[in-house]
Amino acid sequence: MKTFCGRANPTTGAMEWVEEDENYDYHQEIARSRYADMLHDKDRNTKYYQGIRAAVSRVKERGEKAIVLDIGTGTGLLSMMAASAGADFCYAVEVFKPMANAAVKIVEKNGFRDKIKVINKHSTEVTVGPDGDMQCRANILVTELFDTELIGEGALPTYEHAHKYLVQEGCEAVPHRATVYVQLVESKRMWSWNKLFPVHVEAEDGEKIIVSPSEMENCPGVPSVCDIQLNQMPSGDFTILSDVVTMFSVDFSKLVRSASASYRVQLEPVKSGKAQIVLSWWDIDMDPCGRINCTMAPYWVKNTSAFQWRDHWMQCVYFLPNEEPVVQGEKVYLVACRDEYSVWYKLQKARGEEENKVAARVESPVCRCQAHLLWNRPRFGQLNDQNRTGQYIKALMKVLKTDSVCLCISDGSLLPVLAHYLGAKQFFKANHLEDKIKIIETRPELLLSSHLEDKKISVLVGEPFFTTSLLPWHNLYFWYARTAVSSHLTSTVTVLPQSAALHMMIVEFQDLWRIRSPCGICEGFDVRTMDDMIKNSLNFRESKEAEPHPLWEYPCKSLSDPQEVLTFDFRDTVPEHSLSTEGSVKLLRKGKSHGAVLWMEYHLAADISVNTGLLQISNEKGNCEWNPHCKQAVYFFSSVIESEPLPDLPSAVTYAINFNTKTGEIVMDFKL
């Protein structure tokens, strides 16, 4: 049997259905899962174990049998903790079949076969009774159903159902409660991920300012949370406008309601400024007294050196529908609304009590300008990057003449407007200056002379940026589009960017390596079956591929100098033959070679380039600064996945990289 998967074709820029092995989806799910990250989360595991021990003790002290229901068991870890803490029996529910099969093996391997029953169902399908999946209702409910936003994975409806049908009234719950915290901030950097700022263009006839249309300016955006590693956000990039306050909490030991709800808190600004962003995180108390607490609080709130790095739970950035001025000491209300799966916020000025009660329920924001649907957060940041825009302006000023006829091939780009202000006579944009810029809604290979009013293109431009691109080299689609429109170009056409280069560097990650590293023994339990399963799925294909990560969120140090490994000349059409290179890169610093990072640099014109990866190596230790608006490609070495001991300081890494011009994909191999 075969399965069809949607994938962007880098040579056409289109989404296509690709035939894959029937196990492809399953291997993807396992290989890309966060199980390893969770099992490496020492803080989470320890606190869960403490909470489970305490809950089992409380039940036993009442003279009852401890019957545990563990929803979303994964590896079976929490059920094994309960069994070893003295629980009489555990029902471990796991909907994902391969995971449930692994849990059965892990439970057996650790000697809990008689104490734990793995149920491969969604918890809402579990039955209770003499012939049911569970003999009786449980009196201890253990779950780990949370995401960064707390409720995004459907925790609330799952709890609601469990309380109604699967557990006893007054049951113990681990965790016992979750609390969501918020803090109001002003941040030009984060706000630039949500709104398009004015662009200043110095043209020959004076300064021009490109402003976004009013419907974009006033658009409330989309309700989706922006989850990031807030601990990597420098304190200089935001101004705190309020203290941290509790927004709402959920008691998991009682019936949980999943129906939409709203909450309101009063804030007294500690500083005057523009309220733009609500930063949010949560903590969980594993016991009723709140002595066993696991928190996601960022560094400026939880000032401790013993930070637990984790990637499965981060912190939330919410954008207010519009920025609101707040004055120090003048109280305001923050309203949080939620449905079953998401949360959104609105600020209200303090008014009469009744008036505010009426206004408390806020509808979920809906994007009216389309930009928030077309551009993701990093793309907004990229378009607002004045230094990057400055490079394009400099390059365009070099190549544009008053009679230039331009064609732009990029998704949702500002280049046509820049080019128009810098003096291009006519601009065709593939994909308010309606009479000056013509938008052609066709694919490059279907472009006709009539689209171009029988003119030849003298300047072809692209950023290049395409919404379907996942890895840095997928934007090489520009080269394929350039090849497709060749017949419409003048013989002396200027192509901007004129070329691109793929760069590479060997790095040691501070923490990111954990997402691919085997766990072995976790809190005394053998989970190597899980390690083998992940390794098997990675070997199915993933381990031979790079994966995209925004490295500004994941500190690493360079062990080698950055190296240019492949170049792509856009002045010529895409060649028939593959482009390949091999060589070795010398390691200059001591450290664990976790992998290679790859990124693209675009040469716009002579001495003017735009870099999507490494901005600088900031000190002699090799700490790296990365372009914050792009994801870089990370290729983890097999030594991370296999947990092999590294050779004593390898002196070099050899590589072989092949760019297949037929598929637009890059295949690589590295050896330490």
Image (spheres, rainbow, N blue to C red):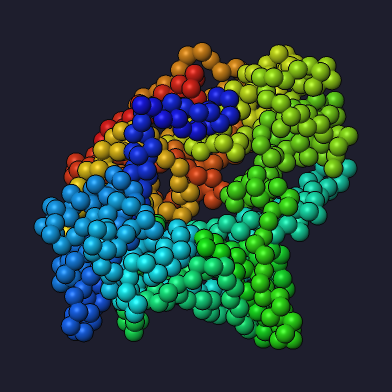
- Residue drawn at x 65%, y 47% is 373
Please identify the residue farthest to the left as the structure is shown.
111
Q: Quadrant of the N terminus?
A: top left
Residue 633: x, y in percent? 44, 40
Q: Is residue 617 above or below residue 2?
A: below
Please tell me in which quadrant of the rendered image residue 165 appears.
bottom left
Residue 670: x, y in percent? 31, 32
- Residue drawn at x 64%, y 30% is 497
Please identify the residue farthest to the front as the structure is shown.
130
Is residue 423 something that shows in the picture?
no
Q: Nearest the camera: 294 or 309? A: 294
Please tell me in which quadrant of the rendered image residue 541 appears.
top left
282 sits to left or right of 207: left
Residue 360: x, y in percent? 67, 75
Q: Nearest the camera: 168 or 412? A: 168
- Disc tally is 0
Residue 197: x, y in percent? 72, 54
Q: Quadrant of the C terminus?
A: top left
73 sits to left or right of 562: left
Is residue 80 something that shows in the picture?
yes
- Residue drawn at x 67%, y 60% is 365
- Residue drawn at x 82%, y 40% is 421
